[in-house]
Image: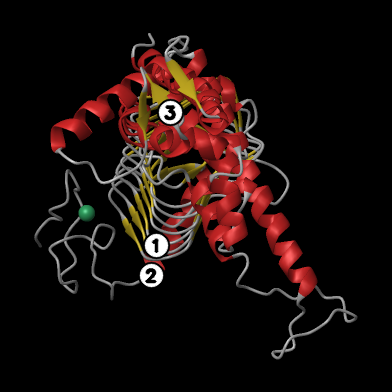
Amino acid sequence: MTGCVWGECEKDADPSLTDELCVWHSEDPKKPHGPFEDELAGFFDVADAWIDGWHVPVKVDFAGTRTARKVWNDIDIADATFIEAVDFARIQPVIMEISRTTFKASVSFASSDFTHLEHLRFDGITFEGVTVFDQVTFDDMSFSNCHFRGGATFKNAKARRLQFGSCRFDGVTEFEQFSTSDSTAFLECVFAGPTTLLTTAMSRVHFARCDVAELRLSGGAFLASAEFHSVEWPREGLPEEREARRAASGYADRWYPTGDPNDVTDAEGLKVIFQRQARSSFTTRALQDAERLYRELRRSADNHRYWQDSSYFYKRELEMRRLAAGPGHSFRNALRRNIGCVEGWFALLSDYGTSLQRPLAWLGVLLLVVYPTFFAALGVTDNGLVYRLAIPPSLSEWLGAQLSLVALSTSMAALMPASSTTVLSPLAQLAVISLRVIGPLLAFLITLAIRTRFRR
Ligand SMILES: [Zn+2]
């Protein structure tokens, strides 16, 4: 008889199995289930379970009755692999060793009580199925290098201190009414699947170096008190924004039934007028929700003096407001969101106060090209010279005339008085008035961009 080669296992290898391991450690899918069922029932009676490294092919129930908690003296499932579902619901372990464990199917820790453990650490666990931590209570708890692949729920879970380090959330993950009395930290976590934080108090939640591509923060309460440190914010916006944009881009084209049989129906039998309104109010609400989310996040960034994040959120907040002014494909709405609202102009002229190049370029084009042309066209006489639009007789003459008109435009934009020799037609005077508004406005936007850049 050869011994089992797994770790310090002292059992004999099972010659009927393909790997040189005992029945407990073997990964052979054809191994018998009977011994597991007997052994696990025995563990349940003595409330001790040492199954480290086991490859368990049967369902495991640590749970006990529906009402009372099951107290376990010692559970050791390090390096174990569970092929079938595992139920840890309502357990109350005194000692628990769980690291490098793999759960191939669903696992439930619902209503478990881990408060008797001073510190519980889930290390290197792979949860491939649905994982439930609903109503669980932890004291000081950490998940490190855990991989939640099949979705996880933490509804009404409570902890004193909780930390997720280098964890990956691939499935749908729901933190709902989740609370920690001390703090919650997510360090270097990747939220690759849709993760929600519905009505979770975020006031003592800290995120550092996380990938938040699919994290939906909008459900969280007190978001402005949460801290986000070195978080890579997605260029294309947070999921709430992406969804609102999708709704905005498709809202005029699609028809949704309203359920009212008196509505007018189209060729496909779908309701027409009300659907469009329902869709548009949905879109507006989605955009407003995204705007609110960015405002809360901006407040958080301001509170913690992360100015770069702050200006990112500010920009996106105004962008959401701009889109809400005219969502959809119609020309009228495109006009509304681009030039029919203050946000549209703010975006166009200075990229929401963040771009230095944009107002400088506008200023250059207006002072060098647009206003000199206006003045020539509208009628200006200076020092007895009459300027007008014509094909210039020579380049040097054109250059001289253009330069004096540029000088005139610039002095007007700088709010300087017109010289006594300059005579302006009534229309040219109107152009001067517009220039005296636009000039200082662009100067203000330039100052704003510089201030944003050097804010500390
Ligand atoms: Zn073994």
Mark positioned earlier in the residue sequence (2 or 3): 2
- Asked whether 316 or 369 is in front, the reply is 369
Q: Are marks 1 and 2 in contact (CB under 8 Å)?
A: yes
Identity of the residue drawn at 74% across and 70% down: 275
Secondary structure at numbered mark 3 = strand
- Image-based side of 260 in relation to 301, left or right: right
- Image-based side of 3 in relation to 330, left or right: left
Which residue is label 2 attached to? 33
Residue situated furthest right in the rendering: 262
If the picture is divided into quarters, which one holds ligand 1?
bottom left
Position of residue 137 measured from the top left corner of the image (x, y, whole percent):
60, 32
Mark in front: 1 vs 3: 3
- Asked whether 102 or 194 is in front, the reply is 194
Which residue is label 1 attached to? 36
Q: The C terminus lies in which quarter of the figure?
A: top left
Which residue is label 3 attached to? 380
Label 3 crowd bin: few (<14), some (14–19), many (20+), radius 10 Å = many
Secondary structure at numbered mark 1 = helix
Mark 3 belongs to which amino acid?
Val
Mark 2 belongs to which amino acid?
His
Position of residue 416 measured from the top left corner of the image (x, y, whole percent):
45, 9
Mark 1 belongs to which amino acid?
Phe
Q: Is residue 267 above or below residue 297?
A: below
Real-space Cα separation, disc 1 to disc 3, in angstroms = 99 Å
Q: Is the image coloured rainbow, by chain, by secondary structure, or in one colour?
A: secondary structure
Label 2 crowd bin: few (<14), some (14–19), many (20+), radius 10 Å = some
Ligand 1: does it lie within 8 Å of the C-beta at label 3?
A: no
Q: The N terminus lies in which quarter of the figure?
A: bottom left
Position of residue 108 measured from the top left corner of the image (x, y, whole percent):
54, 51
